[in-house]
Each structure stands twice: as C-alpha cells, then as structure tokens.
Image: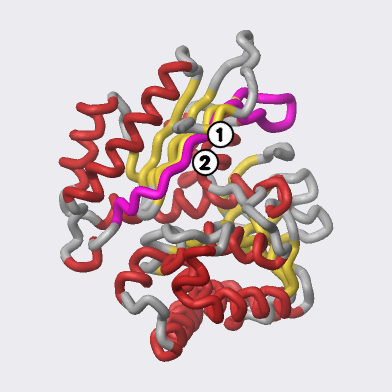
Amino acid sequence: MQKYNKLRKPDETARTYAAIDLGTNSCRLVIATPTPTSFRVVETFSRITRLGEGIINGNRLSKDATRRTIRALKICSEVINEYAPIYRSRFVATAACRRADNCKEFLTEVKRQTGLNIEIISSQEESRLAVVGCVPLLNRNLKRVLVFDIGGGSTEISLARVTNSGKTFIEGYISLPYGVVTVSEAFPNKDMTNLAYNTIIERTHKLLESFEEKHHIFEAIKNQEIQIIGTSGTVTVLGAVQLNLPRYNRSAVDGISISKQDLERSITKIRRMGAEGRKKHPCIGPLKADLTIAGCAIIEGICSFWPVSEVTVADRGIREGILLDMMHNRPQKMRRRNFYNRRNKRNNEHDTSKHGSH
C-alpha cells in the first residue's frame, strides 16, 4: 500500500518547500514548489495519530500516542529526504505539545529518531497561520473575515481585515481550550448525549462573550460585512455530507459555501447516523466517528452565537499558511518577529501579508 500521496512530478529546477503540521489528532506533511502567485503541491502525507490522546487526564503524552506519532514522522522524514535539498522548511506542533509536561522529551526523541526539528507554536501564531492558509478563499467584496480552525486540542478563532491593496491584518483572536479530541474524551459515550452536546455549545457561547464585547462582531455579521470561513476535519466532513459525495473529494469541498440551514441539516443528519452509521460513512469512517460529533458541537456553538448565514468550507489551513509564509515573505525568524512587533498605526492590527490564490 502506498504510504503517501505523490501528486505530480516536481520541476527539478524549482525550489522545494516542506511543511509539517503536528496536531493533537493528526500529522500532516506537504511538499510544494512556488508558482508566480502561490504554490504547486508535489506531495502530501496525512495520518491520524491522536498524539493528544488521554492528555486531559494528566497533561502528558502517552507512550502509545508518541510511538504512533513518531512512526508517522519517520515517514515524513523519508518523504522529505526524497526531495532533498529542501530550500526552506518549517515543522510545527500545536495544542497537545503546548499542553504536555513531557513534550520536551518527546521532541528530543523525535529529533533522535527522525532528524526533524519540531517547533511548538503559540495559539496566536496558529491562528495567524490558519488565516494565511485561507487567504485564497477570501471574498474580495468583503473587507473582513472570521476564520475558525477546530483542532484536536484547541479551537482558534481569528478576526481579520482585508485592505484595498489585498493585505490582511489580524484584528483579534481567541483560542478556545478544547478541540475534537479533548471534547470526545471528556464525553466518551459512543453517542454524545444531548446534555453533553449542549454543554459544549453553552461553554463556547460563554467564552466568546468577551471576544464579542471587544470587537463588536455580531452587527457586522448581521449586516453581511464579514465572511465566515471554517477549517477543520469536521467542517470538510459537513461539506462532503452536504454534497452527498460517495467518497471524500478535496477539490469538490474546498471553497464551497454552506448556508446556515444546510449546515444545521447536515449536522442533524450526522447525529442521527449513530456511532455505527458514522463509522460506515465513506466521508467519516471509524477514526473520525466520535471526533465529528465533538466538532459539530463546537461548530454549532460558534454559528449559533453569531447570526451566521453561511460558512465557507476550507480544506486548507496551517500547512498552507506555512508554505505561503515561506514562499512570499522573508525568512521565518525575521517574519515572526516583525509580525508580533509591527503594528498598523491606524488600526493597531497585525499584518499577515499579501498572498496569491492557491
């Protein structure tokens, strides 16, 4: 069986870039070469490793989870070596590694066994990269966008503004301290009870109150001045269910818009499938059956707090954000330092820079 997805033969003269997003639930690699406006993917690899499995019980990465993840990272390392020399690369870890007390030991072992240097990024940097990765899906007729990225261990929500020149600035962000893995483990029944489901919705509403008070998003969404983009496995599953796809198809799902009513119908359909039905569904499967319900609760919490009329589905995010950062900006150390230090004097906003379409 092919271990990874070789999409097309790379141009031997092109500079090659590599990005890894090591999340609480999955390990994802992409290798790409630049184009005049964006990039061309030459290879991808993705595996559900559940690195953050059980982390809610003691803030430690388990031995089984780290073994699974290191096996996946070994494949990533092998694939990257096939494309050496890599012109520029960045490998990041998110919520599980931010939370785990034994993460330093884990990353030391990753380095020893795979040769990969994994960087733990903040929730703020994670939010920024998610926005950058979704820039190609922006509606140029709207000047603001709200991007929510539901991970395994946290959920990042970013509010950004688009200038007339096409640049995007982060106005604000919030990180919800839970994602699909931590929610599914907190409520381990095969079918999340209505009480548990509604608890997640209510908690999401409570956490979003201060964000709303600071940025006054409600009225702007009500007046259709803000585009809503969702990026996560659950969001793309909802897109696939809405389209009645016989199997998942990224090109069909990425970039579609789903109305609030259709979103609610798809969520209801997924909940009514039951655990066994979700395991058998070609766009969900056994590895995502419990996670999808957890994700639906978080999505409902976000979309019912604000008067959302539709959501743009993004099958893209941190990996794509890393690539666009590396290809269209200065070296990473300089880039990140300037991102956090430089302020837009008029709006006091963070610059995510300009990117082309992907």
Q: Main secondary structure of the magenta part?
A: strand
- Residue at the spot of label 2: 319
Quadrant position of residue 70 = top left
* Residue 64 seen anywhere in this rendered image of the structure: yes
Where is residue 310? Give x, y as percent.
73, 71
Quadrant position of residue 321 = top right
Where is residue 99? Give x, y as percent.
26, 57
Query: Is residue 47 covered in magenta?
Result: yes
Q: Residue at x 67, y 65 (%)?
A: 228
- Asked whether the residues under the numbered discs 2 and 1 touch, taking CB atoms below 8 Å apart as contact, a structural biologist would say yes
Query: Is residue 242 covered in magenta?
Result: no
Q: Is residue 52 left or right of residue 222?
A: left
Q: Nearer the viewer, residue 326 or 292?
A: 292
User: In this picture, is 353 found above or below 276?
Assistant: above
Q: Residue at x 75, y 63 (%)?
A: 257
The magenta segment is 33-52
- Residue at the spot of label 1: 323
Q: Is residue 225 left or right of residue 211?
A: right
Q: Nearer the viewer, residue 278 or 198?
A: 278
Q: Is residue 213 left or right of residue 78?
A: right
Helix, strand or loop at label 1? It is helix
User: In which quadrant is the C terminus drawn?
Assistant: top right
Crowding at mark 2 (Cα within 10 Å: few <14, some 14-19, many 20+): many
Identified by mark 1, the residue type is Leu
Q: Residue at x 35, y 37 (%)?
A: 72
Q: Is residue 121 left or right of residue 268?
A: left
Where is residue 108? Give x, y as percent.
19, 34
User: In this picture, is 26 found above or below 156?
Assistant: above
Q: Residue at x 45, y 49 (%)?
A: 125
* Residue 175 seen anywhere in this rendered image of the structure: no
Q: CA distance from mark 2 to mark 1?
A: 6 Å
Helix, strand or loop at label 2? It is helix
